[in-house]
Image (tube, rainbow, N blue to C red):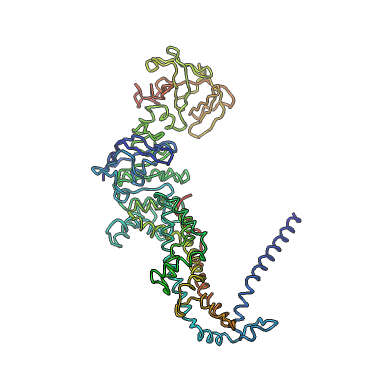
Amino acid sequence: MREQRRKDAVWRFLTYAFVITMVVVMMVPLYWMLVAATLPQEQFLQFPPRLIPGTAFLDNFAALQERLDFVRTIRNSVLIAVVYTLLSLVLCSMAGFAFAKYEFKFKEPIFYTILATLVLPIQLLVIPLFLLMAQLDWTNTFRAIILPWAANPIGIFLMRQNMKSIPDALLESARMDGATEFQIFYRIALPTMRSSLAALAIILFLFQWDLFLYPLVILETADMYTIPIGLAQLTGFQRIYYDQIMVAATLAIVPMVVLFLVLQKQFVSGILAGSLKE
Amino acid sequence: MSGINITELDKVYDSGTENVVAVENLSVEINHGEFLVLVGPSGCGKSTTLRCLAGLEDVTDGSIRFGDNDVTDHRASERDVAMVFQNYALYPHMTVRGNIGFGLKLSTKLTGDEIEQKVESVAEMLGISKLLDEKPKALSGGQQQRVALGRAIVREPSVFLMDEPLSNLDAKLRSDMRTELQELQADLDVTTVYVTHDQTEAMAMGDRIAVMDGGVLQQVGPPEEVYRSPVNQFVADFIGSPSINLLSADVEGETLRGPGGFTYELDDPEPIAGHDRVRVGVRPEDITVVDSGQNTADVTVVEPMGNENFLYMEMDGHELTARVDPSIRPAEETQVSFDFREAALYLFDAQTGDALKTKTDNVDPAVVGATED
């Protein structure tokens, strides 16, 4: 008994030690980014490194804004990511609903074909997509960034798996109540999927937020740049503007954090609880 | 308001490699305002039949009419039916008010106030007025059940369909709701088709019951008729609790000889004429324990029910059940003699299972049970 309790305590200690180590490993770069954003360039490179925040954040930001118009860059990124996320949520949830709840010809082959596109890396798609966009005369436009990825295979897969958990009786009940198929989707299926939609929204937003190579090829003028491309502009041949990069990087994570905080309360499990008597 | 006419209904599922026949050549006429119970073991096609009536499944062949309306090819929403599901299928993200009013909101042109009024009057009828602003997950099973009923009632459909609506409730609540449902159905005077696998429920609730097996309708009739005059061994076995005692017996002239020395001499051998072997059936309540007699069995278990005792007996490996007076309580492992009246005897064809003789043959129902041998 006592032996067992000691064993448990040791295990608990080891678990906590591991978790804390992992947290530190992950938080240190983040902290360093925040600190560095507040330091002038000279202090940034000094050794031993300075770990206490400085006061140069606004100066660094002013320099960044002058070089890049970073406010507009953020606005571009937010606009693209928000529109993309909303559009993709609609498409993925509709496709997922169809794959989960309807029977149609070649359903399985179509679904697996969509899944198979996951193995294609973006790098492989960049050139053909660029040629396509050039033919459509869509280069240097936001729609060229948004539309090709709108039907996201991961999103479709995720929504299909989750929609499968909606009891058929719930949909049939709505059908008996006189709901059209679209009403069933919109008024019954979607509201029960809130936590999955929130999770998917974060995945989609992050995907578009981080997209680098493809926008780099498509977007030609500085006024259209997104954050990853803007950040890349700060690494010159002569000089790397660490202070400005750190400010930009710090600002770049703000929308993600906000999004996460907003959606966090949707991650409550048991949205479906109470619909069916087990 | 209408009756239902099902004509030669077939439902075949095509599973790719083979066809599964769920319902075969089903014809039933259900009168306006009638409470018909579809009963049978799981997989007998009763739920599929109900789903065909609801418009949730296409029919393979045959037709369904509600009153003068052929609804065979109508969608569920066009049939003016409401269904209560076994697991209630309440919309989890809506309040009780939202759940009950959802159908009205979608399928009628009523104003918000009118809907609200109807929802409230139905809630009052079902005693759930205080729960209108709760979400389903905050409700008990019985309350969820009432909400599901309310959702069906509020639309004032011409047909109610119920798919085992009471099977998830505990025994006490189930029998309360049983009565309540019957009263409600009688008040509303709506044609109702009710599916259950519980024969007690079927007997208790149905104006008529329809027994199904293997996708085929076996018998339709008032509960007493189905109980007393089953058309075949399956119906006799399925209806009645505890189940009828069945054993195989050889026919020797006017005498039936079964396992464990069972013998029974028939006064009227006409039903077994031309048969070498038959199945003999006796309802548990028709078996009487006697001081001495031809037939004996070993008592294995005695279950006192209070108002009666169930005797479980064994006769050369064949189980027998008897419902007897509570004063009769033989010790377990003892041998008792038993007897029954010929009028209470059922006989079935050993091969086809078709009834050769049933309880009601030549028997006035009023007399049965009034006299003791």
> Furthest residue to the left?
B68
Quadrant of residue A36 in the image? bottom right
Percent of width and height locating residue B270: 37, 15
Residue B174 relative to residue B101: left or right = right
Residue A174 visible in this rendered orientation of the protein: yes
Q: Foreground: B24 or B276?
A: B24
Q: Foreground: B66 or A256?
A: A256
Percent of width and height locating residue B260: 54, 19
Percent of width and height locating residue B341: 42, 20
Residue at the spot 37% in from the left edge and 33% down from the top edge: B216
Q: Foreground: B361 or A42?
A: A42
> Furthest residue to the right?
A3
Quadrant of residue B206 in the image? top left
Residue at the spot 56% in from the left edge and 78% down from the top edge: A250
Image quarter in which the C terminus of chain B is found = top left
Percent of width and height locating residue A261: 51, 70
Q: Foreground: B219 or B216?
A: B216
